[in-house]
Image (cartoon, rainbow, N blue to C red):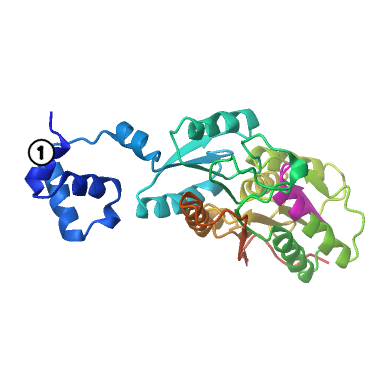
Amino acid sequence: MVSIKDVAELAGVSTATVSRALADPDKVVARTREKVFRAVEKSGYVANTLARNFRTRKTNMVLVLVPDITNGFFASVIQGIEWVAHQNNYRVLLGDTQYNPEGERAYAELVAQKQADGVITLGCNIPFEYRADRKTIDPNWPPFSMACEYNSQIPVPTVCIDNELAASEVIEYLSSLGHQKIAFINGPKDSPICQDRLRGYKKSMRKIGVTDTRKLVITGDFSINSGRESMQRLLGQGSRPTAVFAANDEMAMGVMAEIKAHGLKIPEDISVVGFDDIRFAEVTDPPLTTVRQPRHDIGKRVMTMMLGLLRGESTKSSRITLAHELIVRGSTAPARP
């Protein structure tokens, strides 16, 4: 079996240099690093990763918890995380939790078992035991950060957008087109970002003189099917809305399908707005007006934040708010008189 000593002799360097080149390549000069890598390839040496992890107490792995891996929104966020991780010699483990808190805690145990160094969650749940009344991060937690969502009780390091402002801007835009009867299909009630979007919706509806929105607001679950079912309920009320704002693009697509199933036209009869700007939004028929989240940048920023936590550079919680953008396409038009 080829040993690290064999690699060192072949490369003409010390065994310590070989170990450093394999564990932390950036700390070895490029010429030496290339000599080591060529020697590794020529000799067929395979590093004992488990032994190295045991010695250093590092795995160079980060666990990312995804609420629903089938939701297209998360793909670009994960790509951003992967890009920064790769640049810094880290790898990413994905856990598809399906919004299950018990599943999230089970995945988080991988850190306690030294199979990952830190946890990033793209949902709103904290996968560790905590007391909400303390309002502080438990110092015993491993490095932990959040993206897209946030937790309203514990100030965890977070990267997201201003969801309340984004929702307000959607209603202001629809109002500028003459719409007043604007329905809102929200996501899960326990999601802080959905609470923010509902707050932004109601605030701007009051500004345009609509104070009673009880029959205009429906709670969905971010799926295409819940968009269809919610639109069925709205159309079944008799007096249909002139515009529908859905809290994500997948529900907006369900809304559009149901509107067409009832023989109505978009945007002539009903305008539709989504949220997220997933890659399919611009190829719907008609193309979907939506709020663009900087998904790739969210992923890059939260992984950069995680690297800081892993290096012990920051123990204070922080919240980074990135800019969003309203993308106007063909699914919205002025309200008919």
Which region of the structure is painted magenta?
182-198
How far from the left and from the top, in percent, is residue 221? 69, 40
Residue 167: x percent and y percent?
Answer: 73, 60
Q: Name the quadrant containing residue 286.
A: bottom right
Location of residue 287 (image quadrant):
bottom right
Q: Decide if residue 73 is on the left or right side of residue 254.
A: left
Please tell me which residue is depicted at 80% across the width and 68% down the height of the picture: 178
Q: Residues within 10 Å of mark 1 (few under 14, many from 20)?
A: some
Task: Indicate left or right for 281 with 29 as reference.
Answer: right
Task: Locate residue 29, reporting x and y percent.
Answer: 21, 60
User: Does dot 1 land on a helix, a strand or a loop?
Assistant: helix
- Residue 279 left/right relative to 46: right
| Residue toward you, 202 or 143 | 143
Q: Residue at x 49, y 55 (%)?
A: 308
Task: Name the residue carrying label 1.
Answer: 6
Q: Indicate yes or no whether the magenta region holds residue 189.
A: yes
Residue at x-position 80% and y-position 56%: 199
Q: Position of residue 35 (x, y in %)?
A: 13, 52
Q: Tell me the amino acid under the disc marked 1.
A: Asp
| 138 part of magenta stretch | no
- Outermost residue toward the bottom in this view: 176
